[in-house]
Image (cartoon, rainbow, N blue to C red):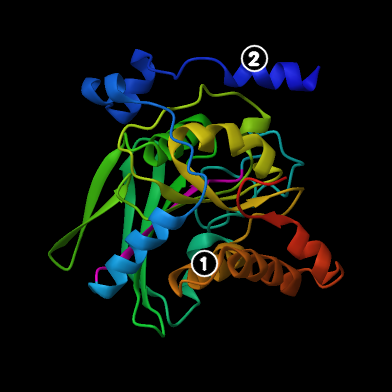
Amino acid sequence: MKSIILYLLFSIQPDTSAAVRSVVSVPEILLHRAEALWVEDRSSIKKALASKITSHVPLIVHVFVPLCDNLNQGIVPVNSKLGDGMNLNTNLYWGAGYGVRSYFKLKTDWKLSLQQANPDSNILERVVFRKTMSNGTAIIMIADAYRGDRMKQCLRSYMHSLAGILNDSISLSDKQYPFHSGADLLIFNGHNGLMDDTLAPVLNADKRPKDAMIIACYSTSYFRPYLQRSGGYPLVTTTGLLAPEAYVIHAAIENWALQKSEKEIRIAAGDAYYAKHPSSTQGGCRGLFRTGWAD
């Protein structure tokens, strides 16, 4: 029965309703030329990344963080401050010790370049961090804190960015840098909203494969059908329950920027998780993460 339900769910047409178009401003021409883009391997992605690094062009990482929300998400409730989806400073996934903003602020080699309140009606805060790796690779990481009651909007933005439909740029030091669909790596980090609700898969419109990381419970199985249509490659996904905290994406991003192999990036994510959960086994923590399409 489960396989039948999944087949029916992911055989539906892409969501091109007026409500979605108003959120992401989808140009009509993109909708007409959209098609499924299943990226079976990363060869073209790695070639594009290597070209940017050689040309001294920064790699762009865009992180989507739906704030932890006891009231609006199907989670085991945490304490009221950690689970307040409107409180940036105490939220488990943003302002708490292992939240994205707090964690990267404490990393002295990651420099905070921008902190912007309310860039749109769904996002409470946007932060931008920069780092130059030992191999000379420059990284610009843009992280958006979505209101806890805007999970569906966060998921839509993530899917439309992977699909090449949602485009934007940001100004840093008088230079414009693309993000959303212009990013090289797109990360979803938070509660798996697909456990609570469904979205119609979004078909690719730009024919540009992108690396995807989804640090959320059981993301391998839940997100796979969406990635197969949008043009995202599952660089790091998960096979079980976990705490989607910032040390995982920190390790994965840095190994990705150093052009490590898919396996090395996955292992780095697992080892970072093990370092914070030593009561687990290292093998178990590594096994919590997957790369590629295999089960």
The answer to whether residue 18 is left or right of residue 270 is left
The answer to whether residue 232 is left or right of residue 72 is left
Occupied quadrant, residue 130:
bottom left
Tell me what residue is drawn at x 50 percent, y 25 percent. 201
Q: Where is residue 96 in the image (x, y as percent from the top left)?
A: 59, 62
Tell me what residue is drawn at x 44 percent, y 29 percent. 36
Q: Where is residue 112 in the image (x, y as percent from the top left)?
A: 36, 71
Per the model, the C-alpha gap separating discs 2 and 1 is: 41 Å
Q: Residue furthest bottom?
A: 134
The answer to whether residue 37 is left or right of residue 268 is left
Q: In this view, does 157 lie above or below 132?
A: above
Q: Position of residue 198 (x, y in %)?
A: 59, 23
Which residue has dot 2 on it?
A: 8
State whether residue 268 appears in this view: yes
Magenta stretch holds residue 145: no
* First along the sequence among labels 2 and 1: 2
**Element carrying mark 1:** helix
Answer few, some or many: residues within 10 Å of disc 2's Cα (few below 14, many 20 plus, some between 14 and 19).
few
Which residue has dot 1 on it?
A: 102
Answer few, some or many: residues within 10 Å of disc 1's Cα (few below 14, many 20 plus, some between 14 and 19).
some
The answer to whether residue 179 is left or right of residue 250 is left
Q: Is residue 181 above or below residue 150?
A: below
Name the amino acid, label 1: Ser
Q: What stretch is highlighted in magenta?
A: 57-68
Q: In this view, does 6 lie above or below 230?
A: above
Instruction: Identify the disc placed on residue 205.
Output: none
Tell me what residue is drawn at x 49 percent, y 66 percent. 253
